[in-house]
Image (cartoon, coloured by chain):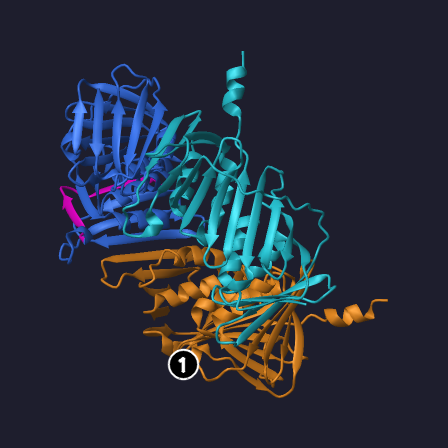
Chain colours: A cyan, B orange, C blue
Amino acid sequence: MLELRLVQGSLLKKVMEAIKDLVNDANFDCSASGFSLQAMDSSHVALVALLLRSEGFEHYRCDRNISMGMNLNNMSKMLKCASNDDIITIKADDGSDTVTFMFESPTQDKIADFEMKLMDIDSEHLGIPEAEYHAIVRMPSSEFARICKDLSSIGDTVVISVTKEGVKFSTRGDIGTANVVCRQNTTVDKPEEATVIEMNEPVSLTFALRYMNSFTKATPLSNTVTLSLSSELPVVVEYKIAEMGYIRFYLAPKIEEDDEEMKP
Amino acid sequence: MLELRLVQGSLLKKVMEAIKDLVNDANFDCSASGFSLQAMDSSHVALVALLLRSEGFEHYRCDRNISMGMNLNNMSKMLKCASNDDIITIKADDGSDTVTFMFESPTQDKIADFEMKLMDIDSEHLGIPEAEYHAIVRMPSSEFARICKDLSSIGDTVVISVTKEGVKFSTRGDIGTANVVCRQNTTVDKPEEATVIEMNEPVSLTFALRYMNSFTKATPLSNTVTLSLSSELPVVVEYKIAEMGYIRFYLAPKIEEDDEEMKP
Amino acid sequence: MLELRLVQGSLLKKVMEAIKDLVNDANFDCSASGFSLQAMDSSHVALVALLLRSEGFEHYRCDRNISMGMNLNNMSKMLKCASNDDIITIKADDGSDTVTFMFESPTQDKIADFEMKLMDIDSEHLGIPEAEYHAIVRMPSSEFARICKDLSSIGDTVVISVTKEGVKFSTRGDIGTANVVCRQNTTVDKPEEATVIEMNEPVSLTFALRYMNSFTKATPLSNTVTLSLSSELPVVVEYKIAEMGYIRFYLAPKIEEDDEEMKP
């Protein structure tokens, strides 16, 4: 028996919008500690990891660990039918091959339940070790989204370079080049507007803008985004979900620049 | 000689938006009592009936009963050129094959007239008898529109079931099932937010969501919608037009459920 | 060495939106007096002339006259990456085949530079003589835009007729005819809402609505538009750019009505 009641139902709607274009089908894993998901994107390049801790739910009952395979597009269709102020409850009986999403309006005058068939999905859970990063950048999530969108009108890849002074996003395309520099800036009125850089050593890495733009669909979930960069590791783009957990995207850097040097 | 002056011109624009996708060509009937229309939709499944009573017009002159055949798409193109606060006058000379729509800005600084050719349209006026209904549901029009839209992302038909406690809208599709229950609720701050059920006997009927969604284009005309349901009659979906009349849509129930029972 | 710093960067973005659909490639001419452009539209029917006077820039350095050929679509892509409150600087080194657009956020925390390749464009600068016009109409730019848009849902051309009382815009199409009259009106609360007519003699001219609609993309640049009409000259549709200059569109009248008279 599974029954998870989330007063802030709009949060679940935003989570679906953040991942449904990246991942088609995925297993949601429920345990006593929380509701989580780990999945590769459909082209097996990026990894997304979601955690919603049990403490964040108004009511959380999960008698035994279960893994529920869902088509994210269908799940998103159903969650779109919840109003933004609805309370959402996820329910599943033991051994059932369906999951039910219940939406209650704040006044309790309207109650909807949507039942969806579960799927069998093969997946292996990757262990993601804690790692040391060369540089960690925290910045406003809307700023990061704007920069990724702007640069993708010029080129296909972005070089992210971090120094003590700031973080630079660069691209190059047929029509020209673009560089955007965000300076370290911690003396702002609102903490969520700060750009904070923790750096052990300078780093400069290249990524596909297509994936970065896809990650920024999580922007409504958090005012800030954190980029953790290291030359030997995938970048981690993390959006914290207030009091509940996070959504993290992992993407390996391109080694394009070396490729070009090797060309005759 | 016909001359109908409507101060609240935006109302006529909303009427056109409500019916132009359902009906291509139709006769508008003018008499001393009002301006009305009755037409089948282009697939001859649904019926729409409009009445704007003469008392609702600032000036209403109709010397003799006339029937004016109009292409609703073209009429809508012209009415879209009226600003929302314009006064609209509909004019036609006796025996003329054109109708003129005049738009006056509130300051009288801008005056537009649009002349449209009339058409000959064969149509029979159906007598719609007053009937007793098993159940009448009055609910917020935006709520009804939202439910029809939400359910059509899951299935093609809606089962509307009324009991004393509330009205249930259900559908079923490839990705799962959905039920939305609106409880009777008369103790609301604003009367237009109430859900009121008058029931003689329980009723459960199936309708094509495509038509229901089309009817909800009339939502801007009224805060509330009334559904009149009976097992032997078409449902009536009525939007009252304040102080002037109404727009009513009639749709026969599907007998799909019986069909399924008969399958071997 | 060229360096033009414009605090009100959004103005340059609006200029690009006003002309980029009309003109593909054009030379921007820089001199001590200002930044200007003159170009035919891609079908060689309309002419656009832009002037931004040097006094309007916060900083204006132009060591020698230069002409910079730019693809307006690419330039627009880059300027769209500037935020509306960014300061924009246009920079070019002597003899360089590139131009740089620099965007500074008001707080100086974000600085972007976009470099674009210049093009060689053949163009002849037309001398446009000062002329006497039969009639000059000044009216709210949003009103003019609305009329051009409305009429193009009915017909392809607009007849603009000016008398002492007002200006009339007429069209005719398959579905009917339309006339919109704006009366001379100088006693309004806000000067930008006035419709002012200076007339030496009545004039009635026909223009392609496609071009008029294209010109109205400049509407965000100014609250008012001025139409200068004469039977022997192209109409001038002018949008003033506050304290800096103007954007002017020139379009020759159609002689359609004479054509029709000549038909057997």
Q: Is residue B250 above or below residue C172?
A: below
Of A240 and B237, the residue lying toward us = A240
Q: Is residue A180 above or below residue C122?
A: below
Q: Outermost residue, bottom direction? A: B200
Q: Position of residue B78 (x, y in %)?
A: 40, 56
Residue carrying label 1: B189
Q: Quadrant of the C terminus of chain A?
A: top right
Q: Is residue B126 above or below residue B82?
A: below
Q: Quadrant of residue A61?
A: bottom right
Which stretch is magenta?
A: C194-209
Q: Position of residue B242 (x, y in %)?
A: 40, 76
Q: Is residue C241 left or right of residue A261?
A: left
Whether residue C136 is visible, yes or no, is yes
Label 1: chain? Answer: B
Of C24 and B252, the residue lying toward us = C24
Residue type beneath disc 1: Asp
Magenta segment's dominant SS is: strand
Q: Position of residue C249 (x, y in %)?
A: 27, 35
The crowd level at tag 1 (other Cα within 10 Å; few <14, some 14-19, many 20+) is: few
Q: Position of residue B248 (x, y in %)?
A: 52, 73
Q: Quadrant of the N terminus of chain A?
A: bottom right
Whether residue B124 is visible, yes or no, is no
Of A29 and B228, the residue lying toward us = A29
Is residue C199 found inside the magenta-colored segment of the image? Answer: yes
Identify the residue shown where x is 14% and y is 54%.
C186
Is residue B206 found inside the magenta-colored segment of the image? Answer: no
